[in-house]
Amino acid sequence: MKKECVLVSGGAGYIGSHTAVELINAGYDVVIADNFSNSDMGAVEGVRRITGVDVPVVEVDCCDKSAFRRVFEQYEFDSVIHFAASKAVGESVADPLKYYGNNLTSFINVVSLMHEFGRHNIVFSSSATVYGEADTLPVTEQTPRKPATSPYGNTKQICEDILRDSVAAYDGLRGIALRYFNPIGAHPSALIGELPRGVPQNLVPYITQTAAGIRECLSIFGDDYPTPDGSCIRDYIDIVDLARAHVVAITRMVGGKCRKNYEIFNIGTGKGVSVFELVKTFERVNNLKLNYKVAPRRAGDVVAIWADTSLANKELGWHAERTLDQTLASAWAWEKHIRGIE
Ligand code: UDP
């Protein structure tokens, strides 16, 4: 039987590369499309080494519609997972047109090409950022979205709306938006992982780079929040667990199991962890001391957010499986691998 093929746009990136691996492990064919603006072939090589499959890769900017159209002409996928987007919150505030330009144009292109070519299933990478500072915790998919506090967050909300309206209008199109909480960690093989360019903006890469001696000291942004230990609370989801959520979403659509043509699922662990707890866990599982200090709050941070994942548990049959200990060990193993640390 011919295998189902999935186009993974942004497949050389952090979440995309891990998802490509899990798709292949689950028996799908994968085509990666990436413009390599924030990624490199190393991730693709890692996917190939882990899976033993010579995954095809097309270098293409999804904002260039005629170039992107050629990918649709060349490959017979019925499903797309769209990761290709810019993702730095601070940069989006400094350069909003880059974010609206990239993230909206590439998404509009992918949906319109799917419509033009009669391709059916799309998974969109959304984010818990759409909830903002929620009034009640944990957040369910019904929790109202708050006005976005950054252009990046706004692009996630707008793309969700574009998807909702497009599946309502175009027969045969089905969409699932996965709202990710905080993806962290790396593949257990340490062959792929997160590789931020420049100074990391996210907590775990900053921690691993500090442990590796690349950064001098981690700043913990705020210890006077109204939380038990004063630091912010997030729901840190293992990258492989997150990648598996995409596979079950695709399988649900391919198998005609969707309840509606547009569905939304929270993808997190359901547990809130503070910054101090995360740092202490990292130190314990990896048996090292991290240089850190308390610094002022970072503008735009919400105090606390974690997911109610019951919908994904029930409807997708998906649960986060890896423990925070395993995930933080994998993050350090990956950092050591890329830095050549024994
Ligand atoms: N954080 C921190 N120091 C850093 C980076 C992040 O204390 O160098 C905190 C940040 O204030 C937030 C949490 O870690 O409370 C997660 O931040 P991250 O940027 O990783 O994800 P976000 O939840 O902002 O998307």
Image (cartoon, helix red, strand yellow):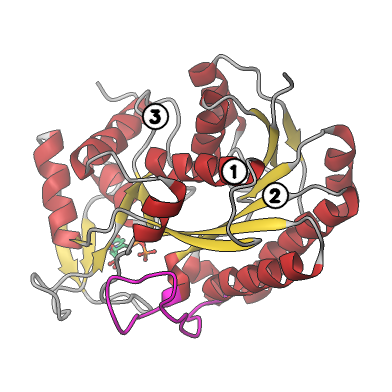
Q: Tell me which amino acid carries mark 1.
A: Ile
User: Would residue 13 be visible to someone looking at this image?
Assistant: no
Q: Main secondary structure of the magenta part?
A: loop
- Which-is-in-front pick, marks 3 and 1? 1
Q: Position of residue 327 (x, y in %)?
A: 27, 39
Q: Please state the horizontal and vertical placement of residue 95, each as a whole percent of the image.
A: 61, 73
Q: Label 1, label 2: how many angstroms apart (C-alpha)?
A: 7 Å
> Between residues 27 and 146, which one lies in front from this camera angle?
27
Residue 250: image tag: 1
**Does the segment drawn in magenta span residue 213?**
no
Q: Separation of disc 3 and disc 1 at Cα?
A: 31 Å
CA neighbours of label 2 inside 10 A, class few (<14), some (14 to 19), many (20+) = many
For the point 30% across and 50% down, the residue is: 204
Q: Specify the quadrant of the image occupied by residue 238.
A: top left
Q: From the viewer's perspective, is 118 left or right of 251?
A: right
Q: Which residues are magenta?
A: 131-151
The residue wearing badge 2 is: 121
Q: Secondary structure at mark 1?
A: helix
Q: Which of the two discs, 2 and 3, labels the residue nearer the N terminus?
A: 2
| Residue 237 percent coordinates (x, y) | 33, 50
* Residues at circles 1 and 2 in contact by the CB criterion of under 8 Å: yes
Q: Quadrant of residue 53?
A: top right
Give the number of the disc on residue 338.
Answer: 3
Q: Is residue 19 above or below residue 86?
A: above
In the rendering, at what x and y percent does residue 319 appear?
Answer: 34, 46
For mark 1, does the 10 Å Cα neighbourhood hold few (<14), some (14 to 19), or many (20 or more) residues?
Answer: many
Among numbered discs 1 and 2, the one appearing first in the sequence: 2
Left-right relation of 257 to 114: left
User: Eyeballing the image, is 141 above or below 107?
Assistant: below
Q: Amino acid at mark 3?
A: Ile
Q: Secondary structure at mark 2?
A: strand
